[in-house]
Image: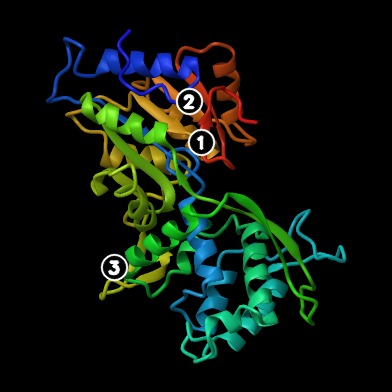
Amino acid sequence: MKEYIQKGSWNDRAFTFINKLIRDHGRDNPAYNPEKKPFAVFDWDNTSIIGDVEEAAFYYLVTELAFKINPQDLYQIIRKNVDKADFAHPYKNIDGNPVNIDQISADIYDVYKRIYGTSDRLGGDVPFEIIKQTNAYKEFVAKMIFRYKAAVYDKNARDPYCWITFLFANYNQDQIEEFCQKAFASLKKENPRREIFTSPEIKSQAGQISTSYFVGLGDIGEMADLYHSLEREGIDVYIVSASFIDIVRAFAIRNSYNFDQAKVLGMRLAKDEEGKILPALDHNFPRTQNEGKSETIRKYIQNTNNYGPIMVGGDSDGDYSMMTEFEETQLRLIIDRARYGAINRLKAKALGGSETIILQARDQYAKKFIKDERSR
């Protein structure tokens, strides 16, 4: 069989079925109609790349104090749409006492007020390198990371998911682009790791806390090659991500992927008349989570001139809907991660020999695929 993609570290099943799909639906099929092109859809974070662009942007935003918001606005954002109950296990303080959003947000607000107007990155004149050594900075970073990991969103909230992106309030399009290029360039140089953040022993409402956070970002050569190969063979490729569209596009239209930005879809934030981001979703567009990903495909991709998605790729339950709702889908690619939920039903079928579901392993710390179905 003709090989349309590079073998790289694809496992044998995945490599075989992907080549078969391209042969059967691409330009080499005598029935191929360029006026009715098929298409494929993929998730972005931890599917197309190693890491999560939104989490990477959050890490850089917090550790580099790159905000454009004042303390009161920050306080409102970090409390927005959060369940007020105590955080679930294991998110307690170091003494084993429960912690909740009221406590953690009060602590963050207190130290951000001290940093704001003091650091040269937030309107003051004290060099950032000096600020980084202070307890206020260490408390702020550790508890912002902890708040992200620990908080559960209010199930009754209209916008339950987008706290990270709301932190980019007052950024405009050009500023987001510039920020992302700096953040991604920096993080791609980093060795992937679990970084431990521990707040200092100072008086606070939540007490001293400690948590870990994955730091790492990288291209996956096999995925970039897959996308280029599909496009070359007449199959359109789209990204539908649950991350903020501007952040995903900042990565996807460059690096080894070189996407047309019109083919990269994701969450959209409201903007003011000057184009600055507001801490709210743009409800003119579907939320690109779960069933919202399928809705996005139907509304913005599927039309009378195509018959896809013939292939769908993802890594988690957030991709389950778009993997299973379209009768046209011939192949489902799952990047194997330690996930719970419905996605594991599809993984079990892949391991059982399904001809429509394939599973591909990776090593996130080496930033590459491995020739297996299950990640180690």
Q: Amino acid at mark 2?
A: Ser
Question: Residue drawn 26% across and 75% down?
Answer: 274
* Up-down relation of residue 240 to residue 250 (above or below): above
First-in-chain label (2 vs 1) = 2
Q: CA distance from mark 3 to mark 1?
A: 31 Å
Q: CA distance from mark 2 to mark 3?
A: 37 Å
Q: In the image, residue 40 lies at what x, y percent?
A: 32, 30
Residue 56 placement, left or right of 30: right
Q: Amino acid at mark 3?
A: Asp
Give the quarter of the figure containing the C terminus: top right
Residue matched to label 2: 9
Question: Residue drawn 42% across and 28% down?
Answer: 325
Q: Amino acid at mark 1?
A: Lys
Tell me whether circle 2 and circle 3 mark residues in contact (CB < 8 Å): no
- Say if residue 101 shows up in the picture: yes
Tell me whether circle 2 and circle 1 mark residues in contact (CB < 8 Å): yes
Q: Which of the pair 2/26 is nearer the observer?
A: 2
